[in-house]
Image (cartoon, rainbow, N blue to C red):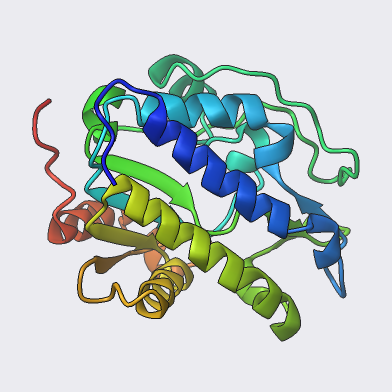
């Protein structure tokens, strides 16, 4: 499937896939056991998320590299609907805007403050240069947490909840890969890498799309505390993502 540059078709198709995925993921059904709150920023931060998708994909097809995260972090996408947490990166560097309406069932220990998180972006130079070649997508659109506000990642969900969640997210991932024309997937962390491989294998695309691993920057990962920036650059270079070609 191909889209001409500077047309809305590519972004609209990605948003349609995400909408269909979310319609199958009734987030309240995941409130079970230690999970007391579930956030879906594609709903309450729909405006900035849609703006992000349109801005990233406005240069057209194909987008050769797809970076796949696990799910929205509490201080990043959960706040803005965008897989970047820093207000200046989202608002000024990327130019994203839109209203964020806190979810109805909000955890008091993880309030939604919108564009308020901090994170640095240094590698790509300009948004157009980055997103001409790379798109960032979270495998799961939902954020899970305990009553204390402690984050629960998808790999820590119970078996039945994972069985409910993962096939839907895998199909959406495959659909987005096909729409973007991506040929290289970089899983941010082992969970994202494994889910990408499973999704591609189930769709008989394992021999057409490469999957690489990028160490997750979580502070819970001891290896990530040892020059994560340097390791990430090396892993992205190995995957062929870096250095980015000129526009």
Q: Please state, as top left, top right, bottom left or bottom right, where the C terminus lies in the image.
A: top left
- Residue found at x 74% / y 28%: 113
Q: Is residue 247 left or right of residue 44?
A: left
Can the viewer see residue 63? yes
Instruction: Point out residue 23 in the picture as x, y percentages from the top left corner.
Output: 71, 52
Instruction: Point out residue 64 in the picture as x, y percentages from the top left corner.
Output: 22, 48
Instruction: Point out residue 156 in the picture as x, y percentages from the top left corner.
Output: 66, 75
Q: Is residue 55 left or right of residue 232?
A: right
Observer-nearest residue: 48 or 209? 209
Observer-nearest residue: 127 or 228? 127
User: Is residue 198 shown above or below 135?
Assistant: below
Instruction: Point out residue 62 in the picture as x, y percentages from the top left corner.
Output: 23, 41
Can the viewer see residue 83? no
- Residue found at x 57% / y 32%: 49
User: Is residue 69 shown above or below 244?
Assistant: below
- Residue found at x 73% / y 76%: 161
Q: Quadrant of residue 78?
A: top right
- Judged from this view, the residue extending furthest toward the bottom is 159
- Residue found at x 70% / y 85%: 159
Q: How many marks?
A: 0
User: Is residue 28 shown above or below 86?
Assistant: below
- Judged from this view, the residue extending furthest toward the front is 1
Q: Quadrant of residue 175?
A: bottom left
């Amino acid at each position: 499937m191909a889209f001409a540059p500077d047309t809305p078709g590519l972004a609209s198709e990605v948003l349609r896939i995400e909408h269909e995925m979310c319609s199958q993921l009734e987030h309240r059904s995941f409130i079970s056991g230690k999970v007391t709150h579930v956030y879906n920023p594609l709903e309450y931060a729909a405006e900035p998320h849609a703006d992000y998708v349109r801005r990233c994909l406005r240069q057209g097809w194909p987008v050769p590299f797809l970076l796949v995260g696990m799910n929205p972090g509490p201080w990043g996408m959960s706040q803005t609907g965008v897989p970047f947490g820093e207000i200046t990166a989202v608002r000024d560097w990327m130019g994203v805007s839109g209203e964020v309406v806190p979810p109805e069932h909000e955890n008091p220990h993880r309030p939604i403050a919108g564009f308020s998180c901090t994170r640095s972006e240094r590698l790509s130079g300009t948004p157009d240069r980055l997103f001409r070649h790379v798109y960032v997508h979270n495998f799961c659109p939902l954020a899970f947490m305990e009553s204390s506000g402690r984050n629960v990642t998808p790999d820590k969900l119970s078996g039945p909840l994972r069985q409910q969640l993962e096939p839907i997210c895998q199909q959406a991932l495959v659909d987005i890969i096909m729409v973007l024309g991506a040929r290289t997937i970089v899983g941010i962390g082992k969970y994202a890498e494994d889910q990408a491989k499973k999704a591609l294998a189930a769709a008989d695309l394992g021999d057409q799309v490469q999957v690489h691993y990028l160490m997750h920057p979580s502070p819970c990962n001891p290896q990530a505390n040892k020059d994560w920036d340097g390791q990430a650059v090396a892993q992205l270079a190995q995957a062929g993502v870096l250095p980015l070609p000129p526009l």
